[in-house]
Image (spheres, helix red, strand yellow):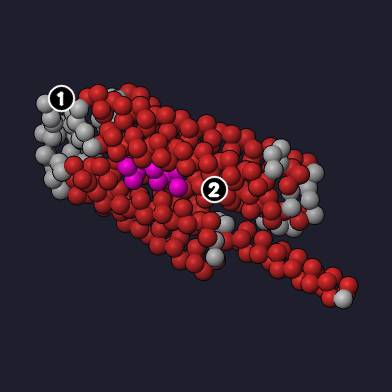
Amino acid sequence: MSNSTSTDSSDSGFEKYPYEPSEAAAIIFIVLFALTTALHAFQLISKRTWFMIPFLVGGAFEIAGYVSRLISSLQAPGPYASTPYIVQTITLLVAPALFAASIYMQLGRIVLMVKGDDKLFIRRTWVTKIFVAGDVASFLLQAAGGGISASSSDPSTTSTGKDVIVVGLFVQIIFFGLFVLVAGLFNIRLNKAPTPESQSLPWKRHMWTLYAVSILIFVRSIVRVVEFIQGFDGYIYSHEVFLYVFDAAMMFVAMAIMNVVHPGEVARIVRGQRSEKDVESGSEMTGRL
């Protein structure tokens, strides 16, 4: 992660990488994300947690991003090809938004599992819709901004792209903040007035997992906001170590946490409750006949 200056510059002075991208760091995180993503693929299929599909796609995006950085590192000290740079810019920007989509849907299933709808101050069905809608908006803004800034060396165009990215990241941060507030209030209310289900089901560890992953994405997003506010000649963008410490490492830890405490347990319990309800409904219908 050297800070030596690349020769890849245009007439405008814009550099794709104001350092020589680290080959070793890219390889390490390709391997790490490949391992955790492969395990998520297995867990998703074996535990039938289809709401984790965005999380899995996010892992694939992380792999694609660091493969692209590896390609760029092999071109050091430049000039750097545009395609790998564009791919790594977009995929690494939007991957956390995909992780967030699954996290938002997980809360709804935890609430359903403990039958704690009355502990939310908004309807459970709206929790997922509102936050996933905000996540989609954040995803599209970041993807559009990343594409604009990465595909042009014109100062005004890259500045526009940077501004769009910042807006997208702020949308993500705002919705994440509201989400943690909703989850926290639900947690407090459930602790004060537990439902019968909450006293016997393992909902707390899944809530703590949700908080941990949310905090990791939240911190990562704040650092990236500061990065883009500083600009492409700013301190954070000019030092590759920030990407690996506050993005790569944090997102890998987030994925690994979800491997260890996988929401498949929540999905299985919810399916079991639905099956019992179907059986009870069938019995009532038979009795009436």
State which region is magenta.
90-98
Q: Nearer the viewer, residue 22 or 153?
A: 153
For residue 12, which numbered disc appears in the image?
A: 1
At x 56%, y 46%, the residue is 104
Magenta stretch containing residue 44, yes or no? no
Q: Nearer the viewer, residue 39 or 116?
A: 116
From the viewer's perspective, is residue 285 above or below residue 136?
A: below
- The amino acid type found where label 2 is placed reads Ile
Upstream in sequence: badge 2 or badge 1? 1
- Does dot 2 land on a helix, a strand or a loop? helix
Q: Which residue is mark 2?
A: 103
Q: Position of residue 32 (x, y in %)?
A: 35, 55
Q: Main secondary structure of the magenta part?
A: helix
Q: Would you say the residues marked 2 and 1 are in contact, meaning their CB atoms lie under 8 Å apart?
A: no
Q: Position of residue 90 (x, y in %)?
A: 32, 42
* C-alpha span from label 2 to label 1: 41 Å
| Residue 196 appears left or right of 160 | right
